[in-house]
Amino acid sequence: MYLNVGRTIAVQSYKHDRSLHRVWSQATVLYDDETVAIVANERTKVVEANGRFWFTKEPSVTHFYKDRWYNVIGIIKEEAISYYCNLSSPALVDTEAIKYIDYDLDVKVASDGTFQVLDQNEYRRHAQQMGYSADLCAILESEFTALQDEIRKKNPPFRPDVIAGWYAKYRSIREEK
């Protein structure tokens, strides 16, 4: 099943123990095929597992990979585009939402391509608490290395023109509605 371009869908993030982590109320589908779903949003309500909520500050374009263990959020700011990457399960797309398991490790990529690894302690703690298997840890570590390579090489989506192009498509879809 592929999502129709222009459709609005929720995004649901879970933890390894199957507990709900976070829900984005809506994202607009820009592209969907067997390997990736690309969505965009702005000023979207995000509800945390504890019921607290907030709204995203900047527009973003997110690549939810169906065959990779991470997702990539291109954050569009006035001065530049930056990225936030979540180590995660491959995305599952169904009629209800785009769903994935968040595995804690994150990478924040500045507009100049430099990056910072975040939440390593949280990853180690959850791996122990939730019983990540040795096989799962090996996959996550391998994918984490692959993600960092993609960032260094500036492969799509780690290029501002790619994110800007998808954002222009999002704006066009929004204007048509």
Image: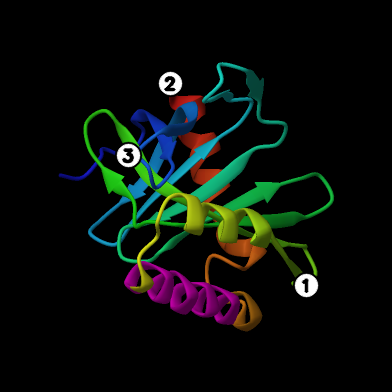
Residue type marked 3: Val
Say which mark, if any, is on residue 63: none
* Residue 149 is a magenta residue: yes
In the rendered image, the quadrant that contains the N terminus is: top left
Foreground label between 2 and 3? 3
- Mark closer to the chain start, 1 or 2: 1
User: Label 3: few (<14), some or many (≥20) within 10 Å?
Assistant: some
Residue type marked 1: Thr
* C-alpha gap between disc 1 and disc 3: 32 Å
**Taking 36 as reference, is 60 left or right?**
right
Residue marked by disc 1: 114
- Mark closer to the chain start, 1 or 3: 3
Q: What are the residue bounds of the magenta stretch?
A: 135-150
Residue marked by disc 2: 177
* C-alpha gap between disc 2 and disc 3: 12 Å
Residue closest to the eye, 105 or 172: 105
Give the prevailing secondary structure in the magenta stretch. Answer: helix
Residue marked by disc 3: 5
User: Label 1: few (<14), some or many (≥20) within 10 Å?
Assistant: few
What residue sits 66% from the left and 30% below the top? Answer: 56
Q: Residue furthest left?
A: 1
**Taking 80 as reference, is 134 left or right?**
left
Foreground label between 1 and 2? 1
